[in-house]
Image: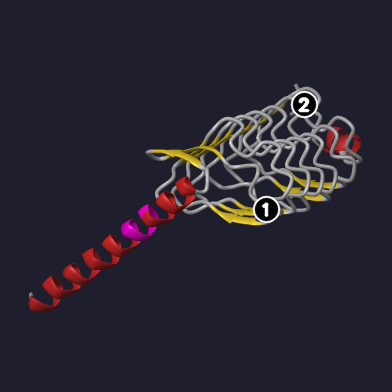
Amino acid sequence: MKFEKMWCLALAGMLAVGIVAGCSKIAADQKRGIRINKRTLYLYNRALPDTEYTVPGGITTIGYTAFSGCQNLTSVKLPNGVTTIGAWAFANCSNLTSITIPDSVTTIDIYAFAECKNLTSVKITKGLTTIAGGAFANCQSLTHVTIPNGVTTIGWEAFAGCSNLTSVTIPPSVTNIRNRAFAGCPCEAQLKRDYPHLFK
């Protein structure tokens, strides 16, 4: 009993340290002109020279156009706990090459990563059921994408214009690939041959 009590106290202390660390990072980021309100990161400061950025713990939503057009960033890490990446959130981040998306993410909205021309790889999380329209449109450096089991719909123009996308792994859970989802991709013709019943 005494051991269990001590363990609970220790765990509470560790959680408190994590919460304080997250709050400290948010406060520091706000001073640098990054707009954060409660659990939403609304707007990254595009004037910052940083090439890498880690979103503070405690944030659950990356807002609409939050990082859109940030030309200096090459890498962004999202903490576990983020559930939503808003529309156009990272659109036109032309030098972004990698992003860490945790499994907690359940929504990637329309055009979230559109025009990220140097994005070479992306992990699509297991919590998603729909890849929204235009989510990765014109990501011209993507060569392979694995759609996780659980995704049922690949939206309109989700990967359109990914001119080097030669390979896509489609799981059994997918029941609907919307019109032009892979338009302009080298893999489009093969996908239509392999999965003609899915294209709608």
User: Closer to the camera, 82 or 16?
Assistant: 16
Instruction: Report the coloring of the rendering.
Output: secondary structure
Q: Residue 165 falls in which quadrant of the image?
A: top right
Q: Is residue 101 magenta?
A: no
Q: Is the stretch drawn in magenta largely helix, strand or loop?
A: helix
Label 2 amino acid?
Phe
- Horizontal side of 60 relative to 199 (left or right) equals left
User: Closer to the camera, 1 or 40?
Assistant: 40
Q: Position of residue 80 (x, y in %)?
A: 47, 53
State the SS at label 1: loop
Q: Is residue 13 above or below residue 134?
A: below
Residue behind mark 2: 199
Q: Is residue 21 magenta?
A: yes
- Horizontal side of 191 relative to 84 (left or right) equals right
Count of numbered labels shown in the rendering: 2
Magenta part of the chain: 19-23
Residue behind mark 1: 49
Q: Position of residue 27 (x, y in %)?
A: 40, 50
Sequence-wise first label, 1 or 2: 1
Q: Which mark is residue 16?
A: none
